[in-house]
Image (cartoon, rainbow, N blue to C red):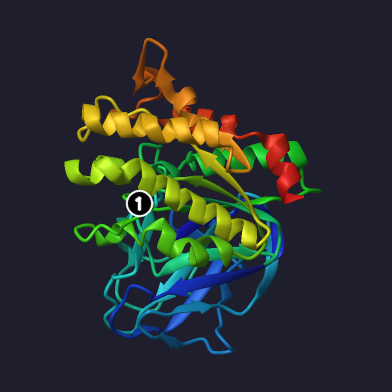
Amino acid sequence: MIVRTSIGGNRIRVRLTNEMGNAPLTIGAAQVGLRASAQAVVAGSNHPLTFGGRTSVTIQPGSPLLSDPVYFQVAPFADLAISLYFPGTALGTTIHRDSWQTNYVSTPGNFAASSTFTVSRSFASWPFLSEVDVDGGAPCVVAIGDSITDGQGSTANQNRRWPDYLARRLQSELGTAGRIGVVNRGIAGNRLLLDDPNALLAGRDVLERFDRDVLATPGIRAVIVAIGINDIVYASGTALGEMRDDLVAGYRQLIARAHARGIAILGATLPPMAGFVYYTAAREAVRQQVNSWLRSANEFDALIDWDTVLRDPSSPARIRPDYNSRDWLHPNDAGYGALANAVPLGELISMVA
């Protein structure tokens, strides 16, 4: 599996997970190295991952597993190759569905320590991998949200999600002297208030996963919350009547929980969606009500007005054509760059410093 770091350092830890599984998951070997090209690892860069000193381990259902520290130099925006060997059957029940990154499966055998291997297939998900910490405790910003934070509509293998663009802005502004990491906790299909029983890979709702995916992140200083549009687009007519107030109550819970831990929290207005397959006038009315509250309440420490950034001036309920990835909800690469550019960088840096 290929993952990109947002900052450099000389120590990493990898968090694996069986949190959505219902059977033990045995990992026979795990390695981390620097990707050379495609599925190849830079010769000599591969390091074994151990867990309490053990190279083979079983993760019980519902549990995560944090590796021991691995000491080697990683540059900012390095592509890491994380290899897992499964000696038996491994059911992909705990999986980040949309990686927008090509990953690889070998032919049968243990090739975890190999620089190259014969590929039997490729896929665009991250199974059993939930986090890579660089210099654990380095200050970071967590981005939590749905498919727009996950990067749906961006170009695969190019790291053009809006958190990727934000990480590059921070690196350009601060240089290597002042490091601020960016952690992407977006999950396609995710909601603020409810789980989707028909889409288990949409993840636990943000109210449920906030402590695990945000507050427990090493080094967190600030969080950017961009969530709520799926609550609206998947809501029935009956639920829409209470949706504005329910979303406001949910946002207030996130604000209170972040502030209780001394963490700054930034919000984002909900994006335009006219033309999207689930668009209705009733849902648009709720979106407008929620955005009106976000702009007027001033309850987040800062607000990023993504609705204004994305909307077509001649048709404000619709995304700008040059930012549209074809479905009239998710931005393309240019749109994601615009979202990142709208983050108030100076204010964010002062929150994290």
- Pick the front one: 95 or 156: 95
Q: Amino acid at mark 1?
A: Arg
Q: Is residue 103 above or below residue 242?
A: below
| Residue 6 position in % (x across, y down) | 61, 51
Q: Which residue is found at the position 65% from the left and 34% from the top?
A: 344
Q: In the orientation shown, which residue stands out farthest toward the right?
A: 177
Task: Look at the numbered disc 1 and give the secondary structure of its residue.
Answer: loop
In the displayed structure, does residue 249 sit left or right of residue 12? left
Question: Split into 4 quadrants, where in the image is the N terminus?
Answer: bottom left
| Residue 297 position in % (x across, y down) | 54, 36
In the displayed structure, does residue 336 sit left or right of residue 169? left
| Residue 56 position in % (x across, y down) | 46, 87
In the displayed structure, does residue 275 sit left or right of residue 227? left
Res. 270 image quadrant: top left
Q: Is residue 183 above or below residue 283?
A: below
Res. 80 image quadrant: bottom right
Q: Which residue is found at the position 67% from the left and 62% from the top?
A: 219
Question: Residue beneath label 1, please?
Answer: 191
Q: Is residue 146 above or below residue 344?
A: below
Residue 270 seen: no
- Pick the front one: 322 or 48: 322
In the displayed structure, does residue 317 sit left or right of residue 310? left
